Image (tube, rainbow, N blue to C red):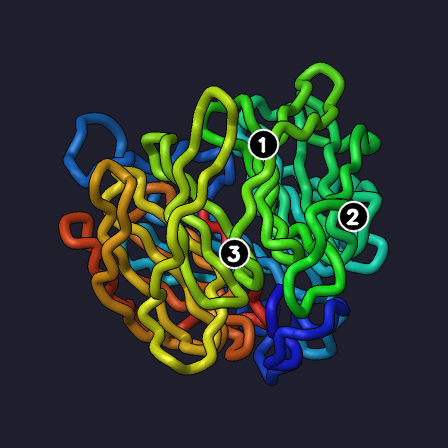
Amino acid sequence: MGAEGTGQQTGTGTGRRRFLGTVAGLGAAATAGTGLRSLEDPPPAETTARRPGPRPPRTRPLFLGTYTSDGRGGTGVGYGTYDTLTGRITAGGVVTGVADPSYLALAPSGRTLYAVNEREEGGVTAMALRPDGRPAVLGTRSTGGAGPCHLSVHPGGRWLLSANYLSGSVAVHPVDPATGALGERTDLVTHADPPPGPGQDGPHAHQILTAPDGRHVLAVDLGNDTVYTYRLDTSAGRLTRLSHAALRPGAGPRHLTFHPSGGFAYLANEVDNTVVVCRYDRRSGRLTPGAPQSTGTGPGTSFPAQILVTRGGRFAYLANRGHNSLTRYAVEAGGARLRLLDTVPVGGDFPRQIAFSPDQRWLFAANQKSGSVTVFAVDAGTGALRRTGAPFTAPVPVCVLPR
């Protein structure tokens, strides 16, 4: 996961993914009368135009992931709300009993929340989202690997996919359609080839996601500079490898996101501090990387974390750890080209992960080292970012998930 713990690119222990900064607890930040709305409320409208009918809720749920095994980390999955008009976050509480929930994902139904358990004996935990706003733990299943750092739900909602960073493998779990609970693992695939990249001791699976076509699953591996394409058997929950795309040695690919057209994807490379536009073949699932491009962070040390693209496909944003900024790109040529526009300070230290609100009016940044979450208003016309209010204090936030 790059250099969160040491500031160096060597070493692969779980500690290198963390930072023991002095931060305040999310529970201490909780205030009475948060006005937490039902987690079953429908999502807000995806346009700023006025529509007839009932108004969307003023507050919506938000969840935070952290490291529970760090002395200054959190005690579980944080939950609260954000104001849809101002972006302001209000603490609600913490779901304890979830070990090292460093990455979170929602089921397509919106009724279940999933978390990785980023430990040597990795796991994934399912939580039901109750109307009172507090997630309820349904249970945990082993991923069969070490240090899971990413997970996603297949669009059909029946399968949970996870990536084990330390052991370089990806796993599949069945999802109970009635409750959202997880069954025993149906597959585990280790990335045995190609060989590791420079300075790496083996494969390090960092992300697994389903392509927009729904037919292919892609796994990003930082350790061997590769993105794998699989087919998921949606009856048996088994992965079949179809192809792989090689990045230049030492790139360290970390996070991939697709353009809404489905024909292009953007890859953030952690180790060499670049981004790459990739062409995606919908029929074969093959990814073809282009030339590496600048992140706009200059000659200093910086580690790209996560890249996002707007629903309309006009702008992309990259979080830069070290430089502590967000890079804004214009997306051109139908998704085939990124043009760097600017970088803006993130207002915190080490932005580990970024996320849009469902209406993409707000962008949230989880700043791991400063123990804060910053909120930006997104200009729909220009893509410009404007930081709003004071950062929200949280213990070692490594994932923020607005709903």
Q: Check if mark 1's residue and mark 2's residue have beta carbons within 8 Å.
A: no
Q: Check if mark 1's residue and mark 3's residue have beta carbons within 8 Å.
A: no
- The quarter of the picture where residue 250 lies is bottom right
Instruction: Count the labels in the image.
Output: 3
In-front residue for pair 377/337 = 337
Residue at 70% in and 28% down: 239
- The quarter of the picture where residue 97 lies is bottom right
Residue at 52% in and 64% down: 270
Side (left or right) of 353 relative to 226? left
Residue at far bottom of view: 22
Q: Nearer the viewer, mark 2 or mark 3?
A: 3
Q: CA distance from mark 1 to mark 2?
A: 20 Å
In-front residue for pair 196/384 = 196
Asked which secondary structure carries label 1, the reply is: strand
Asked which secondary structure carries label 2, the reply is: strand
Work out whether mark 1 precedes mark 3 in sequence or the reverse, and give the earlier one.
Answer: 1
Work out whether mark 2 precedes mark 3 in sequence or the reverse, and give the earlier one.
Answer: 2
Q: CA distance from mark 1 to mark 3?
A: 22 Å
Name the residue beneath numbered marker 1. Answer: 217
Side (left or right) of 159 relative to 259? right
Where residue 313 is drawn, which disc sits there? Answer: none
Label 1 amino acid? Val
For label 3, the crowd category at 10 Å Cα-Cα, with few meaning under 14, some 14 to 19 and many 20 or more, is some
The spot of residue 243 in percent (x, y) is: 60, 32
Side (left or right) of 248 relative to 191? left
Q: Is residue 211 above or below residue 351?
A: above
Residue at 59% in and 48% down: 226
Name the residue beneath numbered marker 3. Answer: 248
Where residue 123 is drawn, which disc sits there? Answer: 2
| Residue 131 visible, this angle | no
- The quarter of the picture where residue 19 lies is bottom right
Side (left or right) of 58 relative to 245? left
